[in-house]
Image (cartoon, rainbow, N blue to C red):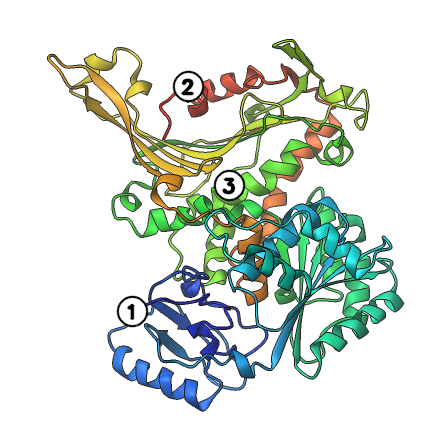
Amino acid sequence: MALSCMRCSPGGAASAVRRGSAASPLPAALSFARCGLRGPVVAVGWRASTSAAATAVKGAMDADVKNAAISAPPSKVENGSPSHVILDDFEDLSPLSENDDSTVSITVVGASGDLAKKKIFPALFALYYEDCLPKHFTIFGYARSKMTDAELRNMVSRTLTCRIDKRENCNEKMEEFLKRCFYHSGQYDSEEHFMDLDKKLKQHEGSRVSNRLFYLSIPPNIFLNVVKCASKSASSVNGWTRVIVEKPFGRDSESSAALTRGLKQYLVEDQIFRWIDHYLGKELVENLSVLRFSNLVFEPLWSRQYIRNVQLIFSEDFGTEGRGGYFDRYGIIRDIMQNHLLQILALFAMETPISLEAEDIRNEKVKVLRSMKPLQLEDVVIGQYKSHTKGGTTYPGYTEDKTVPNDSITPTFAAAALFINNARWDGVPFLMKAGKALHKKGAEIRVQFRHVPGNLYKRSFGTDLDTATNELVIRVQPDEAIYLKINNKIPGLGMRLDRSNLNLHYAARYSKEIPDAYERLLLDAIEGERRLFIRSDELDAAWELFTPLLKELEEKWIAPELYPYGSRGPVGAHYLAAKYNVRWGDMTTEQKA
C-alpha cells in the first residue's frame, strides 16, 4: 500500500495523526517510512486529534494491537497519556491537511553564505519536491547583505536541481517553492531587526499555530548573539521554536561547555539541535545499525572475539585552496576526527539500545565515549601536505595557501589508535585516519575479522595471512556500497584461492537517488526527531577525549610530518598501524564493489 511521506506529507496517512506536544519527537520507529516509501509503520507516543482519525486508529488498534510487537517505550505526551498507534495500510484514512491549523517557518540565518546556497536551500527544495514539508510553510533568508525577495529567489534558483529519478514537473515545482522564499536583511545582534522579522513571519503564519525553525549557517562566534535576539524577539508564542547549530561547536572542552551554557540562557536542551556531524545523516551510516541489529549473521560477530580491528577512514583529494583561514584555526582533528569519525565509532561500538528512541540510542553512544581510553601522543600521527608536481601540474603546499600563515603547523592529516575499555571491545584497536590532499576522496568503515584458527588452507596464502582476512567494508562515499570480502576457490584444476566480494552496490540495487544528508537532518529537525543530533553530555564526552591531546600538541609545538600533495599520507601512519599488527585497508588495490 503506497504511503506518502509518512512523517510529514500533507497528503500522507500520517497526516491523520497529530503531535501531542511541541516537544514530542517523531518516534524512531517511523524513521524508515520516508517520503514516497512503502511499508507498515508503528507510531509511538502520538495521539489522533480528530474523531475521524481517532475512530480509524482505534479500529486498527483493536484489530492489530494484540499481535503488534512494540518494543519502544512510549513518548511523553502533554495533556493525556501516551498512545500507541499502529499505521498499516490506512488507505481509507482521510488526510487532515486541509484543516491543518499549524505552520512551519524556517529561517536560514546566514542565507547569503556558501553553505546556505549549496546545501540548505537545495535540501529544503528536495524535501518540498518529495512532499515532505508541511502544507503551510515559509522560508526566510536572514543576513546582513542587502537583498530583495526577488534577488534571494534568483540566487537560490541557480542552486536548485531535481533528482535524476524525479524529473516530472521540475520547473513548476521550483517556481512553487521559490514563491515560499522571502528575505529579511538585518544585523545578527539587533533585537529590533529580529522583531521586524517576527512581524513578517506573523503575516505569513496568520492565525495558525506557528512553529519556527532557525538554522544558524553562521560562524560560531555569533551564535549567541543570534540566539539571544531570536529568543527574545522572534520565538513562537503558541508552537515550538528550534535552533540548528552547525559545527564547529567549540575548540575544546572549555569553549564547548561555555557555548552550551550560553545557549541554555535562552533555550532549553530540547530546543537545541546540534548538527555537529552531518555524516550521521549519510545513508550508509544510518544503515550501520540496521546492518548490525537486524541481521543475525553479524551481531554475534560484533566483538573482540571475532573482530581484529576497526578502521574509520576519511580522505579528500583536494587541499584548502584559498579557504584556509577557517581550517587553520581548527585543523583536521577538530574538523573531522572529534566529530565525524568519533560519532561513527560510537554508533558502531555501542551496545544494543533498549529501543530506537533517540534518547536510548544516545545513551548507549555516551557510554561508549566514556569508556574510551585517554588518547596518548604516541598513538597519534599528524601530517601536513606539501607541494608536489605530477603530470606537469604543480599542486601548492598547505602553507603556500595565501589564507594560511607561512609558519603554520596545523595538521591537515591525522591518524590515531583508540581503545574502548569494556568487555565487548577490550584490546581491539579502532584506527582513525583523516586527511586533505590525499590520493583519493572517500569515507569508509572497515571491519577486519580475525584469522581462521588452524586454517586448512594456510599454505595457499603463504606467510601473508592478511590476504586471507575476512573484511566488511561500508563505503559511505562516494558510490555507496557494503561489501564483505571472503575467500573462495578459483575455478579450474588444482587449488588456487582468491578473495572476492559479496556486495551491495547501492546504485545497482536501488534506482532511487540517495537523499543528501542535509535533507534527512533538516526533516528530522522539523519533525523533532533527535536521533542524529548531538546531546550536550555526548558532546562533552567527545571533547574530554580529544582536548588533552590537542593541548599537548599545541603546548609542545609538535611539527607535523610532511607528505606530498596527492599521496597516501605520511609514512608515520603506516608505522602506527603496524604497531598494532594492522595494515590500512585502503592502501591496497582491490576489486570495485
Quadrant holding the N terminus:
bottom left
Quadrant holding the C terminus:
top left
Three-letter amino acid code at the position of disc 3: Met
Three-letter amino acid code at the position of disc 1: Ala
CA gap, disc 2 and disc 1: 45 Å
Nearest to viewer (mark 2 / mark 1): 2
Instruction: Determine which of the numbered discs, if any, sits on residue 69 in the image.
Output: 1
Residue 251, how many percent across, how many down? 71, 42
Circle 2 is placed at which residue position? Answer: 588
Nearest to viewer (mark 3 / mark 1): 1
Q: Is residue 252 left or right of residue 307?
A: right
Q: Give the residue displayed 24% in from the left and 19% down from the top.
A: 498
Residues 345 and 47: in front is: 47
Residue 237, how many percent across, how many down? 72, 79
Total numbered circles: 3
**Vertical placement of residue 432 versus 302, above or below:** above
